[in-house]
Image (cartoon, helix red, strand yellow):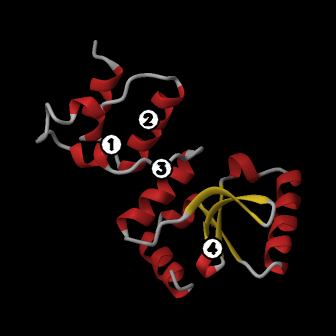
């Protein structure tokens, strides 16, 4: 048996960044001690750099995976789960007036969600924003997605 902090330290060397970030977020929500105090004692442990990266507080696995994608490809930092024009959006680059909404079937597979998403897109587009929607499958082809996002001036 290990402490939550030691478990995070061990996971840092074997999990993809987005999964490690989700584990760290969950530990924080549960008010468990983090692994940051172990970094100085284990500076050469595999994955230590993943623990020292600034945390991104995401709500879903899709958000965590998308933010890892952005970091790996060195895209500009987005505002996360933020209010734009009075509605909450998943990711925004205000200077570029670009919004990315991350859609999983789990949260967007109902008629209500479908209608709400379209209304939200119209509202934001009318206010001068470009809104694009990204799904799990889009992240399965990261090179294509990166190319498309770069074409949108990211």
> Would residue 100 be found to the left or right of residue 148 on screen?
right
* CA distance separating discs 4 and 1: 32 Å
* Mark in front: 3 vs 4: 4
Q: Is residue 103 above or below residue 55?
A: below
Residue topped by disc 4: 94
Disc 2 and disc 1 in contact, CB within 8 angstroms: yes
- Residue 136 position within the rendered picture, expressed as x and y whole percent measured from the top left: 57, 58
Reading the chain from its start, which is encountered first: label 2 or label 4? 2
Relative placement, left or right, of 145 versus 135 is: left
User: Pointer 2 and pointer 4: residues touching (CB < 8 Å)?
Assistant: no
Label 2: few (<14), some (14–19) or many (≥20) C-alpha neighbours in 10 Å: some
Q: Residue furthest left?
A: 44
Counting residues from the start of the chain, the first of labels 2 and 1 encountered is 1
Front: mark 3 or 1: 3
Mark 1 — residue?
15
Along the horizontal axis of the image, is 96 left or right of 122? Answer: left
Q: Is residue 47 visible?
A: no
Residue at x 48% of width, y 30% of height: 28
Crowdedness of circle 3 by 10 Å Cα count: few (<14), some, many (20+)? some
x and y percentages locating residue 124 in the rendered image: 79, 72
Distance from the alpha carbon under mark 2 to that under mark 4: 29 Å
- Dot 2 corresponds to which residue? 23
């Amino acid at each position: 048996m290990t402490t939550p902090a030691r478990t995070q330290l061990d996971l840092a060397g074997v999990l993809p960044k987005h999964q490690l970030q989700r584990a760290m977020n969950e530990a924080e929500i549960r008010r468990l001690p983090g692994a940051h105090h172990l970094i100085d004692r284990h500076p050469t442990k595999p994955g230590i750099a993943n623990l020292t990266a600034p945390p991104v507080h995401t709500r879903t696995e899709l958000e965590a995976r998308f933010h890892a994608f952005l970091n790996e490809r060195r895209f500009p930092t987005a505002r996360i789960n933020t209010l734009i024009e009075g509605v909450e959006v998943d990711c925004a680059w205000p200077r570029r007036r670009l919004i990315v909404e991350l859609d999983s079937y789990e949260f967007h597979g109902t008629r209500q969600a479908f209608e709400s998403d379209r209304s939200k897109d119209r509202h934001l587009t009318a206010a001068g924003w470009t809104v694009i929607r990204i799904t799990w499958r889009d992240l399965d082809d990261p090179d294509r997605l990166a190319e498309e996002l770069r074409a949108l001036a990211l």
